Image (cartoon, grey):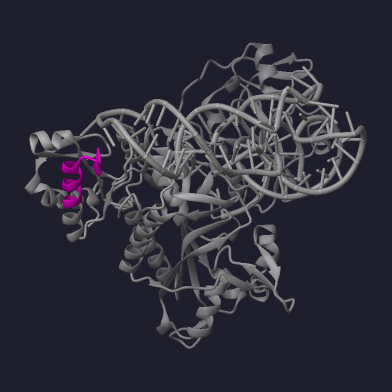
Amino acid sequence: MRMSELLLPTLFEEPREAESISHRLMLRAGLIRMLAAGIYSFLPLGNRVLLKVIRIIREEMDRIGAQELLMPALHPKELWMETGRWELYGQDMFKFKDRKDREFGLGPTHEEVITDIVRKIVRSYRGLPKILYQIQTKFRDEPRPRFGIMRGREFIMKDAYSFGRSDEEAGASYENVYTAYCRIFERLGLDYRAVEADPGLIGGSSSHEFMVMAESGEDLTVICDSCGYAANLEQAEVGERRGENKEELRVLELKETPGMKTVEEVSNFLGVSSERLIKTLLYKADGRVIAVLVPGDREVNETKLRRLLGCSCLEMADVKTIEEVSGCEVGFSGPIGLEGVLIIADESIKEGNNFVVGANRTDAHYLNANLDRDFKVGIFGDVKIAEEKDPCSRCQGSLKICRGIELGHVFKLGTQYSEAMHALFMDEEGRERPIIMGCYGIGVTRLIAAIIEQSHDEKGIIWPMSVAPYKILILPVNITDNFQKDLSEELYKELLDQDIEVLIDDRDESAGRKFNDADLIGIPLRLFIGKKAKETGKIEISYRTGEKFFEEREEISEKIKGLIDISAKTPTDYL
RNA sequence: CGGGGCGUAGCGCAGGCUGGUUUAGCGCGCAUGGUUUGGGACCAUGAGGUCGGAGGUUCGAAUCCUCUCGCCCCGACCA
């Protein structure tokens, strides 16, 4: 392609509306243009990247035997009523009526449609298992679109659905998709982690999120560097730290602490560090009042607490309940003398002693409160939110917290949809059973933003070879110099003839501008043709990343082919 | 949905508080001609605006008031 003919509106100045790095670079490099909030066009260069990403996803999905199909984006309301999600999805779904007043929605996801297809076609266990997928535009009326293409209202997603007759079969599909996802992210050159995620309301067993590490990420991920444990902060486990921080037991002492309600106030007032305090939080779990003890410097993880208790409804107790149960104002609750209340304590309470606790009396705390001697704990568990440097629950390592972007999600759905929609099959014994499903998504457009977040410098994008819009850029420094021009054109034709995706900057622009555009759009390889080519007879090959070397004219196309092949396989040898 | 910011030429901005020498400016870009060409060159000439929209106040509104639309950021929400 000739840059003189390309629709490539690179921007010299920073676009005002863009904040995140990828958003800014995508606008500046002429990849996308906004039509409305969270709605973008892909310009020719951006579209080429998109197509490459899609191709990689297709290859890896096909490799595991998944089959591509294409479903409608326009969904009738009735279908979504079957699962109750028409109401549940609420405002996040674009909804409207057709001319005959029939209600429709634009698909934010396709569980209903795919289940409808399968229930009409698959009748017997002989038709299972199946993995079906599509790459399609999705619509979600996000309350707050953000970071350009990262969180849009219209975006492209690869969504896959598996159908199996047994848990084993469903599990195998899950594993297959999981490995396909790993290969996809590796081929895209991404630094990613598959992290354990909370299955949430859908319940059931496993769920993993594929997170790409990035400063601008919206999600927090907990990672152990020694054993590779990785989990969403919402459910990250914290290991125990044994036997540290103990002193000789001292005598329990009641201390006046007028008006000192928060951990910070009490700790300052008494001159005791906050981890020596125990925070006593009262919750209502399925209507019953419980107390949760965590060190003063830590927060309760309600997701983990809910799971420990096995309760469906968990909420902080209201002021009235707190005052009734502890017999004092809010801020002075403690475990000593709390009658008839189940006390749950974080494991870390075992690690210390001589604690400061609320006295269940307004304006008073106890000093030197000790486990078993002064108060009893009903259940010990891991109920605090993980923090940096916490011990890993599975090895001796310590935890790290990273920001990440969620790019993929794999999910064991079970029979939630098949039961609601009567997607049944006849098993070997002639019994009718609901199909066991899984669903698996990859945010395709978001992925492009994530690649840029991870691969750029102050001058622009650095495309991995696997998704680069063109593999190589030929840049004649001065197009009015006939030697440079002719040599560049010659090389251009030569590379084109070998089916190499090559871009030539044949614009009559100043050298500086051409160099800067080259850095901005991030083509991985380039040939700079200038005075030196004429003087030395050698041609400069340079990587977008910086390294450069010179090669004889005759060797160029062979050399380039080789470089493209090698780079296409890095950073990991996926074949 | 709550809080904050911003809409003036293709892009980035000034002007606005204190209405009138502003015919609405500047830089970049764009067009034409010429000189240039290894890191955003230079000279000359030129085109390009219903100052987001509607209504109001006023002799007079980009500027003041009301409403409205759009975009961005923080939070809530969502996965």
Q: Position of residue A87 (x, y in %)?
A: 71, 64
Q: Height in image: A254 above or below A187? A: above
Q: Position of residue B70 (x, y in %)?
A: 67, 48
Q: Nearer the viewer, residue A3 or A65?
A: A3
Residue A389 visible from this viewpoint:
no
Quadrant in which residue A267 is drawn: top right
Q: Position of residue A173 (x, y in %)?
A: 39, 67
Q: Nearer the viewer, residue A107 or A304?
A: A107
Q: Height in image: A299 above or below A498? A: above
Q: What range is drawn magenta here? A: A475-491
Q: Is residue A330 left or right of residue B42?
A: right
- A489 drawn magenta: yes
- What residue do we see at 65% from left, 68% from top? A105
Residue projecting furthest to the bottom: A430
- What residue do we see at 33% from left, 68% from top? A62
Q: Is residue A495 left or right of residue A89?
A: left
Residue A184 visible from this viewpoint:
yes
- What residue do we see at 43% from left, 33% from top? A400
Quarter of the image with the N terminus of chain A is bottom left
Quadrant in which residue A428 is drawn: bottom left
- A116 drawn magenta: no
Q: Height in image: A404 above or below A338? A: below
Q: Nearer the viewer, residue A8 or A74?
A: A8
Total number of numbered discs in the rendering: 0
Q: Is residue A163 left or right of residue B50?
A: left
Q: Position of residue A172 (x, y in %)?
A: 38, 66
Q: Height in image: A393 above or below A466? A: above
